[in-house]
Amino acid sequence: MSIADPSGPLDQPTQAEPLTIRLTRAAAAIASRGAPDLSAGLLERIFTTPRRYSVPARERDWMVGARTDHLELAGGLRIPLYRWGSGPTVLLIHGMSGRGSQMAGFTAPLVAAGFSVVAFDAPGHGAAPGRRFSLPEYAQVVLQIAAHLGPLAGAVAHSVGAAAATVAMGAGAEIDRLVYFAPLEDMADQLLRLARFLGFSTRVAGRTQHRLETRLGVPMEALRGRDIARTMTRRLLVFHDRYDRMVPFSDGATLVRHWPGARLITTEGLGHARILRDPDALERTVRFFAGPMSGHESS
């Protein structure tokens, strides 16, 4: 399981937990007491390793007509970019363990509204090379893509992808408008939630956070969305399901509360991933981008 696995157990209906999960938690609890450093290394690997899922038929249909090219990132990795249409560019930013095709349901209505749409597979996701990935690295990828495409008319981002967009905006990415779905606001809290879910101790979660901060050279506190949000002047629309079991609803609400002029639309029963396919959310997203350059999105 990864930090934002769109099909992972944190986003499934509550039910009797499988024996394998109960055994995993018991083993993690024992390891936390007897080998905390080893446990922290294991938790770090789980937290930063995306999972690659098979692409469902609906996503294959969405990708029909995409023009594919590649962008070489700093460090030499080449990732695929998928393009549709012509006009001002909207970038689609998937979450951890997601892929560009997962976001491609937005392409047809955005193209019909006169936009060019670009999706991509981040390193370690979809067809892109790589195995491990983190929020600071993702923010750098978004920065490089935004610079490559030129000033963006907008971006649609999901989960950790939304957190990466926020960090990239704080570092100077030029994106005129943003729509976030289930945005992660507090990475340290997400790490603690994963540790608890898997059965690791709070002590191990703290050691894991220290390992990550040392390796990446960025304190998690510097990645908090609320602090970056206070400096933002671009328009933001957020969709978040009240019962999202992967990224708490409070993350989206906190981000909106600190982002001047941002608007939160609350859903119920769509969870963490199905919210991306909600027809009403899709319509509102297109209307948000197609509306006048000033004022507020209409209800």
Image (cartoon, rainbow, N blue to C red):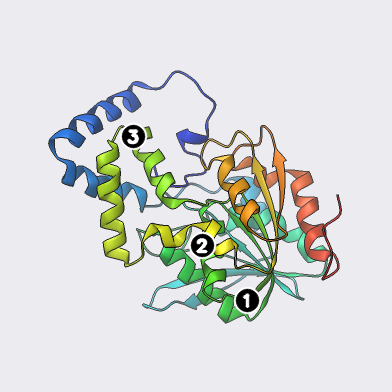
Label 3 residue SS:
helix
Q: Viewed as shown, does residue 33 lie left or right of 123?
A: left
For the question of whether residue 159 can be seen, the reply is: yes
Q: Residue furthest top?
A: 16
Q: Label for residue 43? A: none
Q: Label for residue 198? A: 3
Going 28% across and 30% down the picture, which residue do you hit? 24
CA gap between label 1 and label 3 equals 38 Å
Who comes first in sequence, dot 1 or dot 3?
1
Q: Which residue is mark 2?
A: 164
Going 45% across and 60% down the picture, which residue do you hit? 223
CA gap between label 2 and label 1 equals 14 Å
Label 2 residue SS:
helix
Amino acid of disc 2: Ala
Q: Viewed as shown, does residue 257 lie left or right of 290?
A: left
Label 1 residue SS:
loop
Residue 78 placement: quadrant: bottom left
Residue 263 placed where, x, y %? Answer: 73, 53
Amino acid of disc 1: Glu
Q: Which residue is mark 1?
A: 174
